[in-house]
Image (cartoon, grey):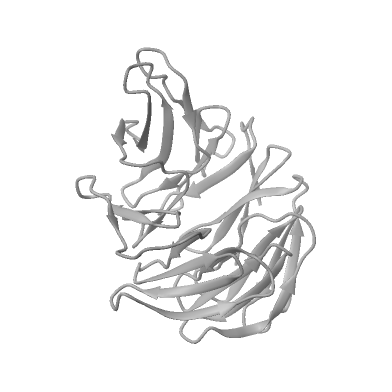
Amino acid sequence: MRRLGGNKHKVYSMDFFPDSSYFVTIGGTSKAIWIWDLQKPDKPKKYQLKKPSPPAEMYVLQDVAVTYRNEIVFPISGDTGTDEGVTDSMAFLAWPSGEFRTIKSERYVGSFRLAKKRSVLVTDTESPKWWNIDSELQWESLDIQLGYSNKMIPNNNMDLFALNRLSQVSLYQVSEKKWTTSHDFRYTVWDVIFSPSGKYLLVNCINRYFQVFETATFTPVGKEIKLEGDFAKPAFTHDDRKLLIPAKGNIHIFDIQTSEELVCYNFEIGNLLAMKISDDGLMYAVSGEKKEIVIADLE
């Protein structure tokens, strides 16, 4: 277990680099990017975002990820101080060169994820859009009309989307351009998460109920899991065998097939705000209300 030094802000979003050599966080109020060399975890590099010219207010949104090219990507929104008013952009910080660029987006991007081995950026909205980071900025989208919903979530291959609509989850097959499955729940659905392979999906509801399903059939796997207290975003391990759920100040690790709790850790960093598993599946990071970050071995 390692505690990362030098952090001064609560961290709500973070990511490992693809090869797990570096780790990045974004501090919501600090307008800065923090980067750790995991061989030297006590000496982070701070990249302070510059205000636009002419001086104007800029806001850094609390979402960050790293592309397969080791570019740190995050959305920014701010008043340019010109007739253009408020603009929305995707920002890219290349590492370790420090080259910084922004690409104006056609829409507000509050939350996003990377898919297809970190090469495609997908927005988390009720009408998702995406673009390949190796191409010119040209948003693509699903040719479907949606009413009110919380958000649509893709699997890693982007051949299947899950629509979270109040107390119902529906699956949309991209190649066939049709809805394939719907499942109703007793409570409002908070989030839907695909496993890395896409074989399973996790549904968690606002009453802190968690259930794993087989994606192809929507058949429950194991039993319902119920935890108390506030929780951060859960995650599957890279081999689809375990489920990690951060609840209160604890990391609960469950066997997917049996729903048995294998182990529970408390790192004494307060209620957990965020969690991330490395691509190689060997370690995970958690941040807490006490403004501390812990990286621990998973296997």
Residue 84 located left or right of residue 1: left
**Residue at 40%, 73% in the rendered image:** 172
- Relative height, residue 3 to residue 143 (above, below): above
Front residue (pair 90, 267): 90
Residue 141 located left or right of residue 22: left
Front residue (pair 187, 18): 187
Residue 108 located left or right of residue 184: left
Residue 46 can be seen in this image: no
Across and down, in percent, residue 22 comes to: 46, 45
Which quadrant of the view contains residue 88? top left
- Relative height, residue 79 to residue 14 (above, below): above
**Residue at 69%, 74% in the rendered image:** 186
- Relative height, residue 155 to residue 251 (above, below): below
- Relative height, residue 96 to residue 80 (above, below): below
Residue 256 can be seen in this image: yes
Across and down, in percent, residue 77 comes to: 43, 32
Front residue (pair 127, 271): 127
**Quick one: quadrant of the C terminus?**
bottom right
**Residue at 34%, 62% in the rendered image:** 116
For the view shown, which residue lies furthest in the top direction? 54
| Count of marks, rendered view | 0
For the view shown, which residue lies furthest in the left direction? 136
Across and down, in percent, residue 298 comes to: 60, 63
**Residue at 51%, 27% in the rendered image:** 31
